[in-house]
Image (cartoon, grey):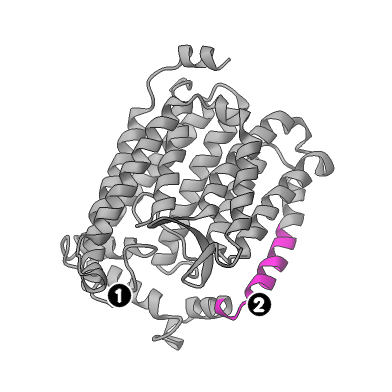
Amino acid sequence: MLKKMIKDSNAPDYILIAVVLGLLTAGIVMVYSSSYVWADYKFDDSMYYLKRQLLFAGAGIVAMIVTTLVPYGTWKKYAKILLITCFVLLLLVLIPGVGMVRGGAQSWIGVGAFSIQPSEFMKLGLIIFLAAYLASNQKYITSFKKGFFPSIMLIFTAFGLIMLQPDLGTGMVLVLTCMVMVFVAGARLWHFFGLAGLGVLGFVALIASAPYRISRITAFLNPWEDPLGDGFQIIQSLYAIGPGGLMGLGLGESLQKYFYLPEPQTDFIFAILGEELGFIGGSAVIGLFLLLLWRGIKIALDAPDSFARFLALGIISMLAIQAMINISVVIGLIPVTGITLPFLSYGGSSLTLTLCSVGVLLNISRYSKI
């Protein structure tokens, strides 16, 4: 079957490739622009983050090329092994001495001079497995016992392990992405309404169980109540975006990166982009994400089989949801969650796995009638 797929394949979606390379280029430029002040102070090397981001981008592009060439049916064949491996990594990161703590979350495993984030692997691993499960069991999805409940239990088992780190932002992206996949598969609405009720109670319990989450909520509602504490990030983010105006202050001219906005090359890179490139620059980036979403949905709709459709839908939903949450945080629409902006934010596991996911999507496009 795989040999036949290779023979019947076409060229990948060039529009999607152009959009991804455009976002990646913008990200590399903004990582340097937002980080050189901090990098020079902390590492005595203004290009520290840029050099590492170029390395991550290079590795990610290689991974994207490889996954573009691998027939998507291969992932279905190894879906169980991939998922088990991801669960093992999530368990390993919780072991003291194995998992590394950064920013209050034990979410990384050190590998030489670098580190990996197992929750990033889980996002893609679970999407692949769930796509295979839904493709094989879609006729049961309207049944709570045979279809809906097994899917939900799997999703929330992964979510629970991620929350033990804890990493609410990544957990939210994973759950919302998988919910989109299950909904499109044909699950009954009343099952979702019941789940939503339980979800609200669980979300309230998660917030109440950790004081810092309560602080984030209160800081979101009124950041000026604690301007030097929990409200500091969002205030500085808005201070960056506001002066940007229509055209921005100019590339490299940000003031907030001078130790006002903490580590602006990661979660709040969009704030620096808005400050330097203004409304036009920010709108251009959002426009590229919308174009990415359109091409991803088009690939999913025209995919040759149900597994490919669910897989493409899961990947593009993950990217769109993560971008939407990140930008919403930066502009003050939702509380701080701590997730990166795909393709733009500094980070190894996130960028590499994102480009790897795009490669899978590109491979599906080679068999889609687009």
Give the class, few, some or many, for how many residues have Cα within 10 Å of label 2's Cα (few <14, many ≥20): few
Q: For this rendering, which residue is in front, 159 or 194?
A: 159
C-alpha gap between disc 1 and disc 2: 30 Å
Residue 239 image label: 1
Determine whether 270 is above or below 289 in the image: below
Disc 2 marks a residue whose amino acid type is Ala
Q: Report whether residue 217 is seen.
A: yes
Where's residue 162, x and y in %? 60, 59
Q: Which is more toward the observer, 332 or 209?
A: 209
Question: Horizontally, is 45 left or right of 352 in the view?
Answer: left
- In what element is the residue under mark 2? helix
Q: How many marks?
A: 2
Q: Where residue 342 sits: x, y (%)?
A: 40, 51
The answer to whether residue 254 is above or below residue 180 is below
Outermost residue, right side: 145
Circle 1 sits in a helix, a strand or a loop, which is it?
A: helix
Q: Amino acid at mark 1?
A: Tyr
**Picture quarter containing residue 163?**
bottom right
Q: Is residue 357 magenta?
A: no
Instruction: Answer left or right for 63 relative to 243.
Output: right
Quadrant holding the N terminus: top right
The label nearer to you, 1 versus 2, is 2
Name the image quarter holding the C terminus. top left
- The answer to which of marks 1 and 2 sits earlier in the sequence is 2
Residue 208, labelled with which disc? 2
> Magenta region, mostly helix, strand or loop?
helix
Q: Which residues are magenta?
A: 196-212
Judged left or right of residue 44, residue 339 is right
Q: Please report the residue visible at 69 percent of the width from the left and 35 percent of the height from the top.
A: 133
Q: Residue 286, image x and y in percent?
A: 35, 51
Task: Specify whether residue 279 is in view.
Answer: no
